Amino acid sequence: MSVLKTAVSALTINTPDLEKSLAVYKLLGFKEVMRADWPFPWIQVSDGVLLIMLRKDDKPYIAITYYVSDLDSVITELMGKGIIFSSLPTKKDMLKRAVTESPDGMTVTFVATPGGFKQPGGKTMAQMSPQDMGDPAKYPNKAIGMFGELAQPVTALAKSLQFWQALGYDKVSQFDAPYPWAIATDGRMVVGLHQTTEFSKPAITYFATNMVQKVAALRKKGLAGISDTMPGHAHLATPEGQTFFLYSMGAPSEATAQTGPEEFTVRAIARVRNSRNEPIDDNWGSITSEIELEADIPESALNAIEDFSHLEILYFFDQVPEDTIIFSGRPRGNPKYPDCGIFAQRKKDRPNRIGLCTVELVGRKGKVLVVRNLDAIDGTPVLDIKPVFKEYRTEHDIRQPEWVGDLMKEYWVGGETGKEKKPKKSTS
């Protein structure tokens, strides 16, 4: 077994302003792990998968660093595999380190450490199952998704692969289109070797199925330095000049390849008022709600609505964080239910966070509707109100899987014909 299997791996990145860089990495889903001033000021950050050493220095620099307990053994092993070191430790060095470079200039350092550094336990994209890669709820980094690779431009893919394999990396995949490229990993660090001129320096690459929403959320938080490269893909330059590639999983469809997905602006026309202020499951039959029109919506918009017994309420799940949106998963996370696409269930973590419910109209007080069987919490924005027409209801028997009946058996408990039970925190 390679001596590197027990090493702690990290990316070392220079920054002239540690605190300014730290603030940006926190927005990117990283947390401070530790800091010190010896042998230079530094801060370690991690998102649970990738460990980054931010080092105070004005000179731009990025390296893959291995912290090892037996540096001499590492040097001996790697030299035996043909690795050439540009720098080796001397007896005078307080910090013992050895340095090598890939054929394309990626610095790899090996530093003797007495301990204290820990390898994050999260999974890289290469270690995740295809099912988990499609579920943003499973992403280790909620802000930007899954660590995919440290992308490195190379001039000769075969020569570069030979170096990384000698270093102890295994080739995961190799392709010829749209140019020669390959992925290699040592089980923790992942490098992408790209024989292309489309980019010129190493880039930390993350992937997510909902990257469009994640990038929008970063912009909303005021993160600067983001540029869109194509639909669903963005590049980010950190304060110290490090590039992040933020890529959507899957290729854009032909319809959106030129213009990207269409976006629309909607507004709240009313607000829900009731006694439930937490998104919890079940027992909605005990809740009577008021739907109050916004100040600029005239009362006349409700004229003659009392002639209807039931209404359809379209509302917005405004308390669902964008980074929890999913495209598939088990309803309520229950292992006895099947894995369903988001459009085959009524979970609140939806791409556009839109809810729909048919309610009973109890009465009206000016600009306020009193309704029953509305499963929306206090303060929920209402997007539209429509009367129920019998002619729109299906004339056929409703077909649904068995799990739906099991999930819904206590959903409306607590009403006039139900028995009140303690509600459970909502997951659907």
Image (tube, helix red, strand yellow):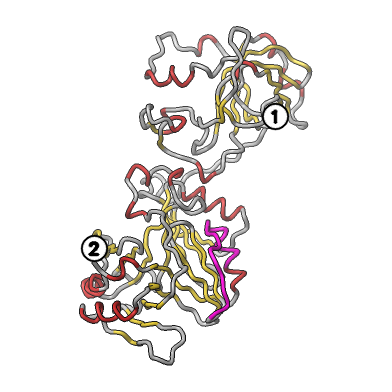
Q: Taking 101 as reference, is 203 left or right?
A: right
Name the spot of residue 267 as percent of width and height, x first.
65, 36
CB contact under 8 Å: marks 2 and 1: no
Who's the residue at 56% across and 43% down the image?
321
Q: Taking 298 as reference, is 138 left or right?
A: left
**For residue 187: magenta?**
no
Name the spot of residue 384 as percent of width and height, x first.
62, 27
Q: Amino acid at mark 1?
A: Arg
**For residue 28: magenta?**
yes
Who's the residue at 62% across and 55% down the image?
221
Total count of labels: 2
Nearest the viewer among 278 and 257 is 278
Q: Amino acid at mark 2?
A: Lys
- Give the residue pinned by disc 1: 271
Name the spot of residue 231 as percent of width and height, x first.
44, 52
Q: SS of the residue at dot 2?
A: strand
Q: Is residue 114 above or below residue 87?
A: above
Badge nearest the viewer, 2 or 1: 2
Q: SS of the residue at dot 1?
A: strand
- Give the residue pinned by disc 2: 171
